[in-house]
Image: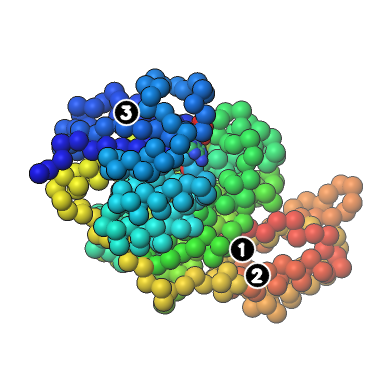
């Protein structure tokens, strides 16, 4: 007999969890109509029972004992919105082993352990949904798994970290230093007290690992992704970028090549007419190219309690519907282990160099010779006025596409030239 009620155990009642609980508690009839079953919040796991919560949850629903959810046979679905690796990964594994379905917003767990959890879920005949793990409220995973499943995905390029996009936007618009812009983002609630995960590109790399794995059906591990944060970008780079017709964005990019894929996260100069150059503030955007569909752009709020709860509760309705029908509405995952990630040194990209040199004859020839010997062809070149105090000038060079290893060799060889004071900035051009 078909179930009339689906019991949910919720882990986490913070920014996202409180919005998930609120929607479940205040929108019951609408959710039941869409899901075809009543969605019943049966237990909520937190760390601190006495903490003040932004929503009213009956005190007897709350527990600090994970077994109260994991050992409760009546709980059909575990919704995890707590975050972090262990002990949460272990809870998800236990839930799957106990035959519970899982919905998670946890990018760290899904990026690091997703393929193993999905394989275990397939073995146990349960589902793992993780729409909220990437891009907050933007429908990405479901788009890949259902609407775009007739395609071979060729590339995915994204502005997928709202914090760095806000910070870079403030540096560009107001000429702020990185530290000033991060401080502003923290005051506005867009950055954590410790912003390393965002500023260092770790968060974007986790999300790209998930997107790449789903897009190509291969295992893209976070440690295989080339990652560079925005720490080295300086306010002056935004001025030169604008002059050259670019914005500076933290880009997460993956692209299919014969037998391999490239996957990288780094700040990049993005042409001003590219849709990713126009993504503002804490917004996220994902640009997908499929062989049948062509180009698709998905834009929206990549974070925040309400947008993320939209993805979590959407997954819950979808899952409830398929449980009620006794079918899996989405194809199960299978990953091709033969396809790996290309080492960054072999990736072909364009580059921007900002170089401070002595203002004297012969410098340009020496720099030109380094590029020529490394087989790197120059696309544009700007010389800025002499600095008043020390008689140096700034050279801004952009290149045609070249192998990353050659671009890096050119960078270090130039830094060793006697009239070169510093290669002050190196950015890839998208
Ligand atoms: N916030 C966003 O905009 C956003 C967007 C997309 C994805 N996500 C993901 O959603 C998840 C939750 O994020 P959040 O911003 O809602 O975090 P949060 O505000 O810090 O809330 C975390 C909640 O989980 C509980 N918790 C944490 N570790 C726990 C443990 N070991 N055992 C039991 N309870 C535990 C905390 O309990 P206490 O309240 O008792 O401390 C808290 O209620 C993370 O995976 C995050 O990456 C968040």
The percent coordinates of residue 320 (x first, y second) are 22, 42
Bin the neighbour count of mark 3 within 10 Å (Cα to Cα): few under 14, some 14-19, many 20 and up: some
State which tag comes first along the sequence, 1 or 3. Answer: 3
Residue for point 17% across, 53% down: 327
Task: Work out which quarter of the rendered image holds the N terminus and state it.
Answer: top left
Q: Residue furthest left?
A: 1
From the image, tell me which residue sits under label 2.
407
Q: Are marks 2 and 1 in contact (CB under 8 Å)?
A: yes
Task: Give the quadrant of residue 122.
Answer: bottom left
Q: CA distance from mark 1 to mark 3?
A: 47 Å
State which tag comes first along the sequence, 2 or 1. Answer: 1
Q: Secondary structure at mark 3?
A: helix
Single out the mark in the foreground, 3 or 2: 3
The percent coordinates of residue 377 (x first, y second) are 62, 72
Residue for point 79% across, 66% down: 415
Q: In the depicted view, which residue is nearer to us: 14 or 370?
A: 14
- 270 w.r.t. 282: above or below: below
From the image, tell me which residue sits under label 1.
351
- 368 w.r.t. 427: above or below: below
Confirm whether residue 140 shows in the render: no
From the image, tell me which residue sits under label 3.
23
Residue for point 75% across, 68% down: 412
């Amino acid at each position: 007999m078909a179930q009339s009620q689906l019991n949910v155990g919720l882990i986490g009642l913070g920014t996202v969890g409180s919005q998930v609980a609120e929607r479940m508690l205040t929108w019951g009839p609408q959710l039941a109509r869409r899901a075809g079953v009543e969605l019943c919040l049966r237990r909520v796991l937190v760390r601190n029972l006495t903490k003040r919560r932004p929503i009213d949850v009956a005190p007897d629903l709350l527990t600090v004992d994970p077994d109260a959810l994991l050992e409760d046979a009546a709980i059909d679905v575990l919704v995890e919105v707590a975050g972090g690796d262990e002990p949460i990964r272990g809870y998800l594994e236990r839930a799957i082993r106990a035959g519970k379905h899982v919905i998670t917003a946890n990018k760290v767990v899904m990026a690091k352990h997703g393929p193993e959890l999905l394989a275990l879920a397939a073995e146990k005949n349960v589902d793992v949904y993780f729409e909220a793990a990437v891009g907050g409220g933007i429908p990405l995973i479901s788009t890949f798994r259902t609407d775009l499943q007739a395609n071979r995905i060729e590339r995915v390029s994204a502005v997928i970290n709202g914090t760095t996009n806000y910070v870079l936007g403030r540096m560009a618009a107001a000429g702020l230093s990185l530290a000033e812009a991060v401080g502003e983002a923290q005051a506005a609630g867009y950055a954590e007290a410790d912003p390393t995960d965002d500023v260092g590109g770790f968060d974007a790399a986790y999300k790209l690992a998930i997107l790449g794995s789903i897009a190509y059906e291969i295992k893209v591990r976070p440690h295989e992704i080339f990652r560079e944060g925005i720490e080295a970008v300086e306010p002056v780079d935004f001025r030169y970028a604008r002059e050259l017709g670019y914005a500076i964005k933290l880009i997460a990019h993956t692209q299919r090549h014969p037998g391999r894929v490239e996957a990288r996260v780094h700040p990049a100069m993005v042409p001003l007419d590219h849709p990713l150059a126009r993504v503002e503030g804490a917004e996220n955007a994902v640009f997908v190219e499929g062989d049948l569909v062509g180009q698709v752009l998905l834009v929206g709020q990549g974070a925040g309690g309400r947008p993320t709860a939209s993805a979590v509760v959407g997954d819950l309705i979808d899952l409830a519907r398929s449980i009620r029908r006794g079918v899996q509405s989405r194809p199960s995952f299978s990953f091709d282990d033969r396809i790996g990630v290309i080492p960054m040194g072999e990736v072909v990209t364009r580059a921007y160099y900002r170089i401070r040199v002595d203002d004297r004859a012969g410098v340009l020839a020496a720099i030109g010779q380094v590029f020529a010997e490394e087989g790197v062809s120059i696309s544009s070149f700007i010389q800025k006025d002499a600095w008043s105090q020390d008689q140096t000038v700034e050279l801004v060079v952009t290149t045609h596409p070249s192998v990353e290893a050659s671009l890096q060799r050119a960078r270090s060889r130039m830094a060793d030239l006697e009239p070169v004071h510093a290669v002050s900035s190196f950015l890839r051009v998208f």
